Image: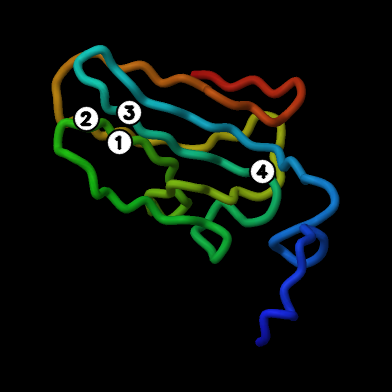
Amino acid sequence: MEESDKINDNSGGIFGGDQVVVHPMVRLKIRSTLNAYSDETVVVFHTGTPAQDGDDVLKYVFALPQAPQIATLSTNSKAMAINAYGPHENGMNVPVTVNAGVTGTYTIDVTEVGIPGFLCGS
């Protein structure tokens, strides 16, 4: 590849395009007032399946023991940082797991919902 092969344009391929596609998604964040640490997990309702597959990103914990961790679970109980769950349906359940190294009260916030009219709870 030569320097002249480069272009200053964001069109084409998986790394660029003329339009930004927003996929339906939910972002969850765990936090507390016990310390400044937090963590996030994302569920994307576009490609993928509820089982672990190539569209998912496994959760790897490289954090301090006192930092809380949150992840969604695949159908084979694998912890996911980014869960490409597949298309969303009414009345569906996505299992969530948390790990807190410090005893106390934690809050899970829904920090982003990319689905119009979508409710997240219980």
Which mark is drawn over residue 69? 1
Q: Residue at x 48, y 29 (%)?
A: 28
Q: Residue furthest front?
A: 4
State yes or no: discs 1 and 2 in contact (Cβ < 8 Å): yes
**SS class of the residue under badge 1?**
strand
Q: Residue furthest bottom?
A: 1
Where's residue 86, x and y in %? 66, 50
To which residue does mark 2 refer?
Answer: 100
> What amino acid is at disc 1?
Gln
From the image, state whether disc 3 or disc 1 is nearer to you.
3
Looking at the image, is mark 4 or mark 3 earlier in the sequence? Answer: 3
> What amino acid is at disc 2?
Ala
Looking at the image, is mark 1 or mark 2 earlier in the sequence? Answer: 1
Looking at the image, is mark 2 or mark 4 earlier in the sequence? Answer: 4
* Quarter of the rendering occupied by the N terminus: bottom right
Q: CA distance from mark 1 to mark 2?
A: 6 Å
Q: Residue at x 71, y 37 (%)?
A: 89
In the displayed structure, would residue 63 be above or below residue 56?
A: above
Are there few (<14), some (14-19), or many (20+) residues within 10 Å of tag 1?
Answer: many
To which residue does mark 3 refer?
Answer: 38
Are there few (<14), some (14-19), or many (20+) residues within 10 Å of tag 3?
Answer: some
Looking at the image, is mark 3 or mark 1 earlier in the sequence? Answer: 3
Q: CA distance from mark 3 to mark 1?
A: 7 Å
Compare residues 89 and 114 and report the one nearer the observer: 114
**SS class of the residue under badge 2?**
loop
Looking at the image, is mark 3 or mark 2 earlier in the sequence? Answer: 3
In the displayed structure, would residue 5 be above or below residue 85?
A: below
To which residue does mark 4 refer?
Answer: 45
